Image: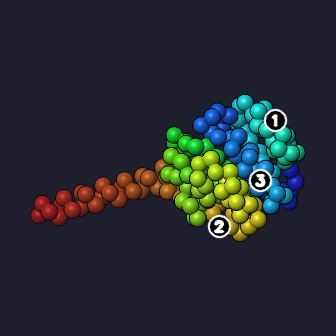
Amino acid sequence: EAVGTASDVIALSVGRNVPKKSLAVGVEAFALALKYAPNLRYVHIGRDGEALTTQAEALGVGDRFHALGEQPRPKTLQAYEEADIFFSPAAMESFGIVTFEAMTASLPSVVSDGPGNRDAIEDGRTGILAPVDDTEAMARALVKLASDESLRSEYGCNARDVVAEFAWPRVAERYVAAFESVTSSTMTDGQ
């Protein structure tokens, strides 16, 4: 089911609502950003989002926040395709699978500058890194991307290019090139 209108800019977060994900910080940042980017809409997919809905309503932004709960994989992938910005306020991500999924969908990211996120996102190239738990910096980043479609497109294309480097065919090419380089130099050295 579609959320929002064609003129809305959708920020998407994906994951369980647990303390290390800092999703409450994300809702606060969204509420601040909405003052300057009224076309922004925040969609969250993951378990235990009821508290986030309550928080959004208390902040007066409940009509622009949507906690969809846990979704089947195809619906989650569709949400990435329909979103405009990937938003991860998580203080840390062990590997950041959701960030790479967003990059595959050509989404620019607004993420906390914590472990995992900083390894995936290149600030100013594939997204914007904001200090952990800094709601104002996250809000500024959301506003910046929400108000600049060409920047979203640029960062999103860059993100997709970066993640393509990790695709198995590309990894295999690098292994073959390394193997050929080693065997070539070994044969040359042996003559």
Helix, strand or loop status at disc 1 = helix
Q: CA distance from mark 3 to mark 2?
A: 25 Å
| Residue on which disc 3 sits | 32
| Residue on which disc 2 sits | 154
Quarter of the picture containing the N terminus is top right
| Residue 54 tag number | 1
Residue at left offset 80%, top offset 61%: 36
Residue at left offset 64%, top offset 33%: 18
Q: Are marks 3 and 2 in contact (CB under 8 Å)?
A: no
Q: Nearer the viewer, residue 191 or 36?
A: 36
Mark 3 residue type: Leu
Comes first in the chain, label 2 or label 1: 1
Mark 1 residue type: Thr
Find residue 10 and report its horizontal and vertical position in percent. 77, 53
Q: Are marks 2 and 1 in contact (CB under 8 Å)?
A: no
Quarter of the picture containing the C terminus is bottom left
Q: Quadrant of residue 24?
A: top right
